[in-house]
Amino acid sequence: MGISFKLDPTFYPSAKEAMRAKAEDLAYVACLYEGTGIGKPDYVAVIDVNPNSPTYSQVVGKVQLPYVGDELHHFGWNACSSSLCPNGKPGLERRYLIVPGLRSSRIYVIDVKEDPKNPRIVKVIEPTEVTEKSKYSRLHTVHCGPNGIYISAFGNPEGEAPGGILVLDHYSFEVLGRWEIDRGDQSLAYDFWWNLPNGVMVTSEWSVPNVIEDGLKLDHLKERYGNRIHFWDLERRKKVHSLTFGEENRMALELRPFHDPSKMMGFVNLVVSLKDLSSSIWLWYQEQGKWEAQKVIEIPAEKPEGNVPEILKPFGMVPPLVTDIDLSLDDRFLYLSCWGTGEVRKYDVTDPFKPILVGKVRLGGIGRGEPHPSTSELSGGPQMLEVSRDGRRVYVTNSLYSSWDNQFYPDGIRGWMAKLNSEDGLSVERGFLVDFGDARAHQVRLRGGDASSDSYCYP
C-alpha cells in the first residue's frame, strides 16, 4: 500500500469544480490605521458572512498586529488549488494567511485552522530578512504557487526601481530570494498572475514607493506611472514581451487572467487617461503565438454633484478611477470598482472582445456620498472587490491607499464592507453592512477560497 496524503477539501483541479464548493461562512478583512492620525497597530478582522448565523454581518474575531505603521493592503493564502498542478508539492493545506505590510515590508503568517474565528500569528518575517534576501521592499500581491509563495514588491529598499517578485518557501516560510533572473527593461511593478500549464507569468505597473507614498502628484502622472504589462517565461524567469497601452493611459493595475488555463487571455484596468480622465479595461490575449491587447471597456469621467477635493478642482470632473477588477470563476462576468464615482459595474464577458454591461450599483463616491440601502451614510467609494466561488456574491470595501484616501476623500474615510448579490444583475444587500469605525478596510479573503485566490491547471 502506497503513502497517502489527505487532500485539502478546498483545493479543486478546475475552476468549474471550485464553483460547486459550499458557500463561504467567514471573511477575513485587512484593516488599517495608516493615514488616520490614530497610532494603533493594524488588524485582520473576521466577519461572519453566513446568512443563517445570529452574528451575520458582524465582526466575530480579530488578529491584532504587534507593530504600528504596517499598512495592511493585499494578502493571500499559503497554499491553494495550484497545489494540484503536476509540479505541486504534496501535503500542503490552506491553513495560513500570508499578510504583508505595504509600508513596513514585514510579513505575518497567521494560522486560521485551529480556531477560524480567532486566528493567531505564528511567524513574523521582519523587513530586514525581506530586503537582505530579495533586495525588495513595500510588499503587495500574494499568490500561492505550486512550488512556493510569491509576493510582489513595489521597489528596492531605497524606494526606487526595480520592483518585482520574491518567493517564500512553502514549508518554512523562509524568504528564498528574488524571482526574476532576466528582467530586461522591466522596472515598475504592481500585480502579477499566471497561466501555469502554459508557463506564462504576467506582471503590471504602478510606480515606485518614493512616488506613491506621500500621495499623488499630478506632474508625476505621465513620466513616473506605468502603462505596460510584461509577459515572462515562468520556468526560465525571463521577460519575453511587453505591451504598452498608449502614452495617455496610466496605472496598469489589476491582472485577471481567465481561470480556464486553455484560454490565453485576461483583463487589466488602466486607472486614468491623461486625455479625459476616463478609465479603461483592456483585454490581453495571444494570437498565433503573439501577444496583443485591445481596449474593450471605457468609462468616462462625470460632472461633480457636490464638492470635489483640491486635487480634482483643476479639471472640474470626477474620474471613475477603476482601481480593482475581478473575474468570476466561470470567466463569464467581470466586475469593476469605480472608486472615484462610487460605482460597481458588472459586465458579461462571454465574448471578451465585446463586454455587455448587465448591472451596476452606487455606493459612496466623490461629491456624491451615495448611502447604503440601509440608509447608512458611506464615506469613500467601492474599492476592493472579492467574488465568491459560485459567483453569486461580491464583497466590497472602501479604502485604496492611505495617502491617496486623504487626497480624494479629505473629509475622511470610515471603513466599511458591503455585500452585493449577483444572481440576477447586481444589487446591494440591505441587511449587510460592516462598520469598521476609524479603521480603514482593504482586501477581503473568503474562507476556503474566492475568485482571485486560486489558480488552476485543468480546463
Image (cartoon, rainbow, N blue to C red):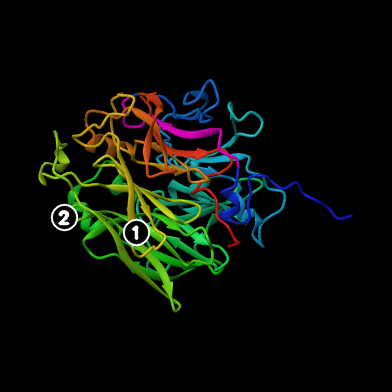
Residue at left 10%, top 44%?
Answer: 316
Rendered residue at 62%/56% (across/down): 146
Task: Work out which residue is located at the far top of the displayed protein and give it.
Answer: 54
- Mark 1 packing: few (<14 Cα in 10 Å), some, or many (20+)? some
Residue 32 within the segment the image draws in magenta? yes
Q: Nearer the viewer, residue 304 or 359?
A: 359
Give whichever of 193, 177 is nearer the camera: 193
How many numbered marks have been drawn onto this rendered protein structure? 2
Q: Nearer the viewer, residue 154 or 296?
A: 296
Q: Residue furthest bottom?
A: 288
Residue 95 in the image: above or below residue 240: above
Return the x and y of residue 323 as percentages of the image width and height: 33, 47
Query: Of circles 1 and 2, which is in front?
Result: 1
Magenta-colored stretch includes residue 35:
yes
> In the rendered view of the protein, which quadrant contains the C terminus?
bottom right
Q: Secondary structure at mark 1?
A: loop
Query: Is 259 situated left or right of 371 in this image?
Result: right
Q: Where residue 299 sits in the image (x, y, percent)?
A: 24, 53
Question: Which residue is under mark 2?
Answer: 276
Q: Residue at x 17, y 46 (%)?
A: 302
**Is residue 136 in sight in this rendering?**
yes
Q: CA distance from mark 1 to mark 2?
A: 22 Å
Question: Does dot 2 land on a helix, a strand or a loop?
Answer: loop
Per the image, the residue denoted by label 1 is 355
**On residue 313, which mark appears?**
none
Type of residue at label 1?
Pro
Range covered by the magenta-colored residues: 22-37
> Which of the marked residues, 1 or 2, is nearer the chain's N terminus?
2
